[in-house]
Image: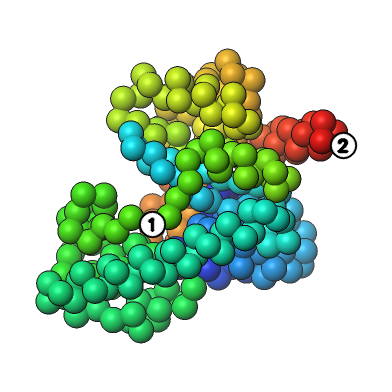
Amino acid sequence: MIDLHTHSRISDGSESPAHVVELAKAAGCSALALTDHDRFDGLAEARQRSEELDIELVPGVEISCHWNVGTMHMLVYFVDQRSAPIAGTLVEMQMAREDRNRKIIALMNSNGIDISYEELAEEGGGSGLGKPHFARLMVRKGIVSNLQEAFDKYLEKGRPYYVHKITYSPEEMIDLALRSGGVPVLAHPYSVSADEKLIPEYVEKWVDAGLAGIEAYYGRYIPAQRRTLIDLAKSLDIVATGGSDFHGEYKPDLSVGVGRGDLLVPGEALDALKDRRRIKTRKDA
């Protein structure tokens, strides 16, 4: 069993990178990918703990792409803070996220919501601040009753406190990942469109651009959805990967390794991703 999609408090999770590794070990995972949003900062801590616990750590990152139909997130594996050119691009995205956070605070303050940047930084641990931390603050202040309400009413696209941040197209991000020696995978594929019939068409286009896999074994998907995505991966000759999308307290229904209790990502998925990386390396040599 493996888990190729987890988040720490370096981005929008509640647990330290080391503790995420500990949770993976306790769950019986043989390998874990730390895939914080737009950041590699937690990899050093996670790597040290993974070596101590004898569990394989796959360096990764999750990146949002601009996509008008739905939500498109890219998981990129086997890159870290030393991998150019993606490292420089992520610094730019982090700066843009910081600017967006301050704009959200200004919007909230203008509407009488008393939230400061200092409170946001304390909630998020000082780095990787984002919408989940705003949501938690809104719950703490009694503005909403739960995290989902904060997103549904205030923070999602089209809501009062949504602010656009810098993103790249899926094709641009796939190219960037490949030029950085990484392996790009589509995260939670059903988020790309409300019309599930269109998803194979979109995925096929991205495969032509170099997409290596799709997250078929996703923590919140039911078995029928997973089977459909596994079949899609087979038909397109790409890898069916998977992970819990663990965020700790910010997604309390998802646990490392097992998701909602029924997740089982086969280790062969990681082997297949490594094969894709080796094939690309040979082609580039």
At 56% from the left edge and 59% from the top edge, which residue is drawn? 90
- The answer to whether residue 15 is visible is no
Q: Position of residue 99 (x, y in %)?
A: 38, 69
Q: Which quadrant is home to the C terminus? A: top right
Instruction: Name the N-terminal-most of marks 1 and 2.
Output: 1
Q: Position of residue 283 (x, y in %)?
A: 82, 31
Give the distance between the C-alpha atoms of the residues marked 1 and 2, in whole angstroms.
36 Å
Q: Position of residue 59 (x, y in %)?
A: 68, 54
At 56% from the left edge and 43% from the top edge, which residue is drawn? 173
Residue 207: which quarter of the image?
A: top right
Check disc 2: other Cα within 10 Å, few if <14, some if 14-19, many if 20+. Answer: few
At 63% from the left edge and 25% from the top edge, which residue is drawn? 238
Name the amino acid type tagged 1.
Lys
Quickly name the residue at label 2: 285
Q: Secondary structure at mark 2?
A: loop
- Total number of numbered discs in the rendering: 2
Please indicate whether residue 280 sits to the left or right of residue 239 in the image: right
In this orientation, which residue lies closer to the viewer: 234 or 77?
A: 77
Q: Is residue 243 above or below residue 126?
A: above
Q: Which quadrant is home to the N terminus? A: top right
In this orientation, which residue lies closer to the viewer: 140 or 204?
A: 204
Quickly name the residue at label 1: 165
Residue farthest bottom in this picture = 118
In this orientation, which residue lies closer to the viewer: 170 or 48?
A: 170
